[in-house]
Amino acid sequence: MVDLRALRYFVAAFEERSVTAAARRCAISQPSITAALQGLEASLGVRLFVRSRQGLAPTRDAEILHGRALGLLAEATAIEREFRARAPRTLSIHIQPDISLRRAAPILRAAYEASPDIVTRIVADPNQADLVIGAEGCLGDGLEFLPVWHEPYVVLAPAGHPIRFKTVVRPSDLEGQPMIERTQCRLQARLESQLSSLGIRPDIRASTADEDAVVTLVELGVGLAIAPASHADGVAGVVTRPLAPEFAVGRTIGLAWRRGGSHAGFARTLAGAMTPPASALAARRTA
């Protein structure tokens, strides 16, 4: 039996005339495209492409298969749409680990309001998700990204810490201060490098990839942390102070989906429901 996925990869290779371009179009690896083509050739007992440094040259058999494949794929898509329309829509969502569920709640609420019968699944693996709620720059390849909101990084401090009296926190204010290192954050290395270039050496008292642990350690008085402002939401024992402009960093949170996937329209609907201006923002591509 001919595999529909292999047919999709074949169509991409036929139309792109290149394994590299087909892999990019399908957001998969080149070996996966090559294996699919070889499997089709073995299954059908024909040669589909003449391979050279210039790319792929389709044979007559490939031209015949291309027309048939387009028809089969169109029919498969029609069948899928027909039956999906009858059943409750299932949406798998991955939420980046350092974004709290409470912070992502407005997006989930918008999903239920946009489609009351929707069935959502929160999944740990972003590769298994229809939509990803994540920060720009922290997403995998092959995704479209639509910004929804921006939030600054701030200094988290125990409620009684003297730094609470600072209007803004400058790099020099962190000299010798006990700090909590957030090992999962990609900006952590950048911040540490910036401090090091200024001769500032915080006293690292704890390191963790668990964002809840970061907030708890700060609340317990173990040290300060530089983290997204939303980390302190609803935590009475933690205060926040903004970073000085020359030291300020932030992150843009948004929705991401697989390039060429079927959820782009739904993602834009959610973004528009969250913040009306976001619907006018162009989706960005990850490399």
Image (cartoon, helix red, strand yellow):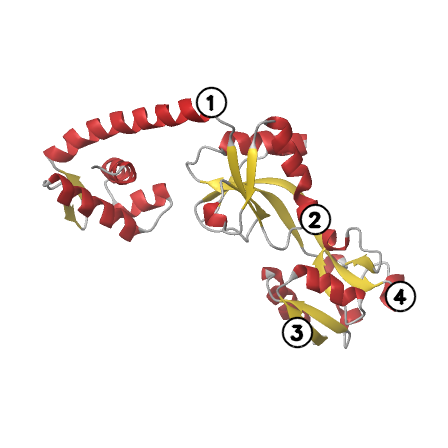
* Residue sitting at x 15%, y 35%: 62
Give amino acid for label 4.
Answer: Gly
Please tell me whether mark 2 sits on a helix, a strand or a loop: strand
Q: Mark 3: few, some, or many residues within 10 Å (few <14, many ≥20)?
A: few
Q: Are marks 4 and 1 in contact (CB under 8 Å)?
A: no
Which residue bears the numbered disc 3?
196
Q: Earlier in the sequence, mark 4 or mark 2?
A: 2
Which marked residue is nearer to the observer: mark 2 or mark 3? 2
How far, Cα to Cα, is label 1 from label 2? 39 Å
Which residue bears the numbered disc 4?
160
Q: Quadrant of residue 232?
A: bottom right
* Residue sitting at x 35%, y 48%: 28
Q: Mark 1: few, some, or many residues within 10 Å (few <14, many ≥20)?
A: few
How far, Cα to Cα, is label 4 from label 1? 57 Å
Q: Mark 4: few, some, or many residues within 10 Å (few <14, many ≥20)?
A: few
Which residue bears the numbered disc 1?
86
The image position of residue 142, as x and y in percent, is 43, 46
Please tell me whether mark 3 sits on a helix, a strand or a loop: helix
Give amino acid for label 3.
Answer: Ser
The image position of residue 256, as x and y in percent, is 53, 42
Which residue bears the numbered disc 2?
151
Please tell me whether mark 1 sits on a helix, a strand or a loop: helix
Where the N terminus falls, by quadrant? Answer: top left
Q: Earlier in the sequence, mark 1 or mark 3?
A: 1
Q: Earlier in the sequence, mark 3 or mark 4?
A: 4
In this orientation, does residue 280 appear? no
